[in-house]
């Protein structure tokens, strides 16, 4: 049976803490993983940096090239694709840098059905509906809750900032090996 699997990139396929050193440098702060209790950079680093957040995808695009896949991502995503599942990469990255996102995914050697850059998190439920998503692999707490409330099965990648998230359709995992056990 073919399934439609939607997968977020940042914090899901990659480390949820990847941006910390870059944001520390840009803001002059020295936060660690234990301080990263909100995915909202305005909360974590302060609203005085709000313009940086708005411009991040456009001004700091080069940072995305340095990101690396978590262990097990490539093998599992390719196994899902090879078994006939439709694999959709659905990211909140700006659509203006879709060329960077798409090239980075291709460089990783990941097989996928399609990539969607939706410029913010607001459209993840709508995208799940459009793609008839069976599973959505995500890290963002708001997205997870919204997808859960809309009836979608969410595989939530554990992070400091989503520890209080629960839901009837949410399964928390700590690794891509755990995702593999759920999906294969």
Image (tube, rainbow, N blue to C red):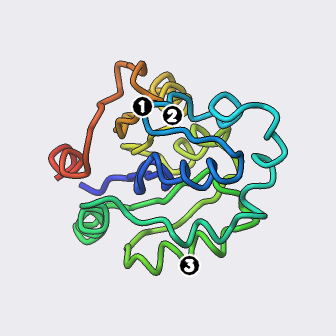
Q: CA distance from mark 3 to mark 1?
A: 29 Å
In the foreground, 93 or 122: 93
Disc number at residue 160?
A: 1
- Relative to 124, does residue 91 appear above or below in the rendering? below
- Name the residue rendered at 37%, 43% in the picture: 135
- Percent across and percent down for residue 29 are 64, 41
SS for callout 3: helix
- Name the residue rendered at 54%, 65% in the picture: 115
Disc number at residue 7?
A: none
SS for callout 2: loop
- Percent across and percent down for residue 171 are 29, 31
- Percent across and percent down for residue 110 are 38, 73
Disc number at residue 36?
A: 2
- Percent across and percent down for residue 64 are 58, 66
Residue under circle 3? 103
Contact (CB < 8 A) between labels 2 and 1? yes
SS for callout 1: helix
Q: For this view, does 182 lie left or right of residue 139?
A: left
Q: CA distance from mark 2 to mark 3?
A: 28 Å
- Compare marks 3 and 1 and give the one earlier in the sequence: 3
In the foreground, 50 or 92: 50
- Relative to 36, does residue 177 appear above or below in the rendering? below
- Compare marks 2 and 3 and give the one earlier in the sequence: 2
- Name the residue rendered at 80%, 54% in the picture: 55
Q: Pointer 1: residues within 10 angstroms few (<14), some, or many (20+)? A: some
| Quadrant location of the N terminus in the rendered image | bottom left
In the foreground, 94 or 30: 30
The mark lying in front, picked from 2 and 3, is: 2
């Amino acid at each position: 049976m073919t399934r439609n699997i939607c997968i977020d990139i940042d914090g899901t396929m990659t480390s949820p803490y990847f941006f910390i050193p870059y944001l520390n440098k840009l803001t002059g702060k020295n936060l660690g993983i234990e301080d990263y209790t909100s995915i909202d950079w305005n909360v974590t680093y302060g609203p005085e940096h709000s313009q940086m957040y708005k411009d991040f995808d456009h001004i700091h695009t080069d940072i995305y090239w340095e990101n690396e896949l978590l262990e097990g991502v490539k093998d599992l995503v390719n196994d899902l694709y090879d078994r006939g599942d439709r694999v959709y990469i659905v990211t909140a990255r700006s659509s203006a840098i879709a060329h960077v996102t798409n090239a980075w995914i291709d460089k990783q050697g990941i097989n996928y059905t399609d990539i969607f850059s939706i410029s913010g998190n607001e459209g993840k439920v709508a995208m799940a509906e459009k793609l008839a998503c069976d599973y959505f692999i995500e890290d963002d707490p708001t997205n997870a809750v919204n997808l859960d409330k809309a009836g979608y099965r969410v595989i939530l990648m554990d992070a400091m900032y989503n520890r209080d998230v629960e839901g009837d359709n949410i399964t928390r995992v700590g690794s891509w090996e755990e995702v593999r056990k759920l999906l294969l």
